[in-house]
Image (tube, helix red, strand yellow):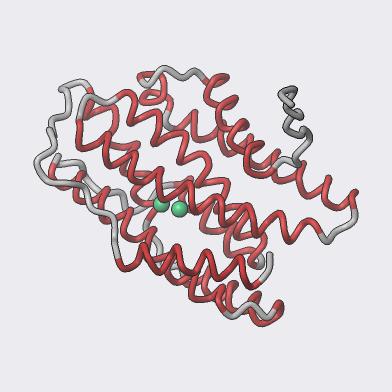
Amino acid sequence: MCPDDLKIWLNHFEYHAGHPRRIPDGLEDVLRPEERPLIARSIAAFQLGEQSEGVTLLHAAQRFSQRHQLPALVRIVELFVREEQQHAMLLRAFMDDHGIPLKRRDWTDQVFRRLRRLAGFELYLCVLITAELIGNVYYRALAAATGCQRLKVLCRTLVADELAHVAFESQLLLALRTVRPGWARALTRSMHRGFFAVTASVVWLTHRSLLRHCGYDARSFLRLCLAQYAFYLAPVESAIAPSSVS
Ligand SMILES: [Fe+2]
Ligand SMILES: [Fe+2]
């Protein structure tokens, strides 16, 4: 990734910081009676996951940007953290209006936070993109299954931001990996994919009531998550076939 790429990402995050996401007023905002107990604990866990001061990430980004002389990276990460806090706020507003209690602790969230503190920027990115790719599958499933217009728009809004986040993180991760020898790239990739598959399975287990309601069993949820992983992080193996039209 070159400084010009970072400039594009900086523009993107600056623009979003100046135009924070809002959910339009006046949307139909009713949860069906059977929906509320299904989503309450699940959405609270995701709200907690979105909420972070980003201190560890910022420190890691500062060290990384000094080492690689990428000063724009620190500002991008600051703005990224702010965008995640905005997600937490939007989810919290929805939960407050529906009397859904916030979570202060969640064991999966604790595991993610501990892992992110373990090492440097690259490992942090691996853990982060894992959570975000799986989160995207989750928010999409929830948007499709709920009858509540506000929740649908909220989920789609979060997905729209997360798509940019995973694009940024995957570009950075692939750039870091590309300078390594082939065997090291393959090893890193298979370790990350293994971690990703385990995490997606744990997410299915801990959110299975809601995900079943959304039409996913363990296998279909894992398949969809792994397809997201492959889309962003697997090596490109096929080319677009040349057009037969002359
Ligand atoms: Fe987010
Ligand atoms: Fe994100």
In this view, the residue in front, 58 or 240, is 240
Q: Quadrant of the N terminus?
A: bottom right
- Residue 17: percent from left, percent from top: 34, 67
Q: Is residue 128 left or right of residue 141?
A: right
- Residue 198: percent from left, percent from top: 62, 36
In this view, the residue in front, 37 or 19, is 19
Q: Is residue 139 left or right of residue 234?
A: left
**Residue shown at 71%/24% (left/top)?**
245
Vertical arrangement, residue 14 with respect to residue 98, above or below: below
Vertical arrangement, residue 157 with respect to residue 11, above or below: above
- Residue 242: percent from left, percent from top: 76, 29
Vertical arrangement, residue 212 with respect to residue 239, above or below: above
**Residue shown at 68%/81% (left/top)?**
69
Q: Is residue 70 left or right of residue 136?
A: right
Q: Quadrant of the C terminus?
A: top right
Q: Is residue 47 left or right of residue 170?
A: left
**Residue shown at 58%/68% (left/top)?**
6
In this view, the residue in front, 178 or 90, is 178
- Residue 42: percent from left, percent from top: 35, 36
Quarter of the rendering containing residue 79:
bottom left
Quarter of the rendering containing residue 194:
top right
Quarter of the rendering containing residue 169:
bottom right
**Residue shown at 24%/51% (left/top)?**
92
